[in-house]
Amino acid sequence: MDNSAAADALEAISPSALSLAAELRGAADPGPTGADLLPDTAESPQDEADPLGDQADACLDGLAGAARMEARLAAVKVHLAAGYSAAEEAMTPPGASAQDRTVRRMSVTAEVAGALTVSEGSAARFLEESARLSGDLPLTLAALGAGTISWQHVRILCDETDGLDPEAAAAFEAHFLDPDAPNAARGCAAGELTPARFRAKARYWRERHHPVSIEKRHCKSVKDRRLEYVPDRDGMAWFSTYLPADQAAGIWNRTTVAARALQGPTESRTLTQLRVDAFATWLLSPAPGVGGTAEDPPAEKVPADAVPAGSTPAGSVPVGDAPSGLVPVGQVPVGGVPSPRAQVLVTVPVFSLLGLSEEPATLDGYGPIPASMARRLAADGATSFLRVLTDPRDGAPLEIGRTSYRLTKPMRQWLRLRDASCTFPSCNNHSLDNDADHILAWAGGGGTGVTNLGQPCPKHHRLKHATAWRPVGATAHESPGWISPSGRSYPSEHQDWEPPEWPRQIQAWLEPLGWPEPAGWPEPMDQPDGPEEFERFDDDYGLAGFEGRECPEAYDAPDGVDGPDAFNGTESALPSDPWPDRASVTAA
């Protein structure tokens, strides 16, 4: 690449950019009332011309075009930075010492920092990213140059491929940026996802395909758990923790449920404020054995799990409104952390649950977690199981249906499983906070099936009913997309369901049939019409109370469980098992 020619081209387009900015400044100011842009009703009927609407559409189109231009210019910056670094490296004498090379790299970083007017730390990171994009991530750089992804998306791709070998990084790139890849990402393209949602999706894929198992990485990272306190301005401070994902999800969900229970006509605090108040109340309430005393605390500091009925001081949370099944603060053993027992939805492959494989489970609102963590949650915290049928070819949940208007708890959990978060474009609201909503209203003939349901957050639920924003196109395992008032379409973000990882014993049985390949899988099973796609398994099997508080091994089941088939129940209305000999093959 001729970098001098690129610099000349950038200089040549500068006057055009200035002229465009001046033109847009004039077009964006229609005057105090905008009357000069209104059509002349005597000569041009309103149904034939809409200058304000046309201007609004043009502004939106211009914003999208400017975003693409920013991405293309970012690609130019990458090429220029990589070219400058390569030129300086080529000018380094072959016999230069390590100290001389370090000093030259420092000088290169300082030069780039001065040219971009950024700190040397930012310049060093930009140079590192430019080198990686030019050498190891060609698809990412090409997409940036085409304007289909933003610089924020590029930085996420660089972060999530950090530590991967070249082959794994190439597979990562192809999954998200090559639509013809064997296992291309589903749903909207990477550039149509907000950076936060793209990071979550990229992290999910990385966790499942990292060359080092998630078990080993988790065992290493859990040693770094910590609590941090950072003073801030105006008498405030930040309080953050780095801890295992299941514990963090349990804490967040518990405070959310408690905060929602406190909302009401006379409550002036927002949901965010109520979460903080509940969290602070639980932590600061004295409790026997945990830095407190057994004496009754003052009224303004009554613990959340000790407030009598009808007495709820400001800043505290009544126990009746908190999730059930949680260990009171005073009963937490020193050095031990209880497993979350409420409002934590974990999708666990059955083979991982039984110890036959180490395929990661999925924690709602977070992503992949180690199979050992999922087994511990099942053994130590689960009071019930929901069996979910999935398509063995791609791992997607299968359709369910309802004949009534109201949703049961299993139906809501299904929506959480399918959508994970609010489906509105750019929204990251956790599914626990969201509302189940009919896409086509019940009064308008819409049914209560998963293909006619979404779970927008309260804010976007109100937006849907108050404006022309409307959800469209939900399927059995794909969340709805949205159509904006201007007619623009925003496709849904589909989850990257993947086929199950079969244990070696089952793979040995399936390989002669050619079934590990997707083309060899049978057609999807017929679905029952009733609600039995979710079959509850309560504590009858004793999974929450057996000795050792560990998930049973594959061949050492607790009392009452004879093997995997015991989870099918005796009154199951689900389709018959297409592989009835699977249990015997597994045990062989």
Image (tube, helix red, strand yellow):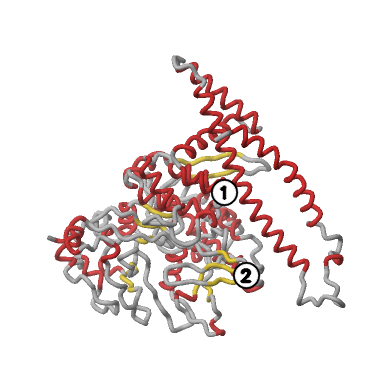
Name the residue nearer the viewer: 338 or 479.
Answer: 479
Is 260 rendered above or below residue 66? Answer: below
Q: Which mark is residue 134?
A: none
Q: Label 1, on which residue?
A: 150
**Residue at the image position 63 percent from the left and 51 percent from the top:** 67
Q: Amino acid at mark 2?
A: Trp
Q: Label 2, on which residue?
A: 469
Is 462 rendered above or below residue 367? Answer: below
In the image, taking residue 456 as reference, residue 20 lies left or right, namely: right
Name the residue nearer the viewer: 12 or 416.
Answer: 12
Q: Earlier in the sequence, mark 1 or mark 2?
A: 1
Check if mark 1's residue and mark 2's residue have beta carbons within 8 Å.
Answer: no
Q: Quadrant of the N terminus?
A: top right
Percent across and percent down for residue 37 are: 83, 66
Name the residue nearer the viewer: 137 or 576.
Answer: 137
Percent across and percent down for residue 284 are: 52, 49
Q: Quadrant of the C terminus?
A: bottom left
Residue 516 lies in quadrant: bottom left
Percent across and percent down for residue 340 are: 40, 57
Is 583 rendered above or below residue 569? Answer: above
Residue 106 lies in quadrant: top right
Element class at badge 2: loop
Q: CA distance from mark 1 to mark 2?
A: 25 Å
| Residue 26 seen by the camera | yes
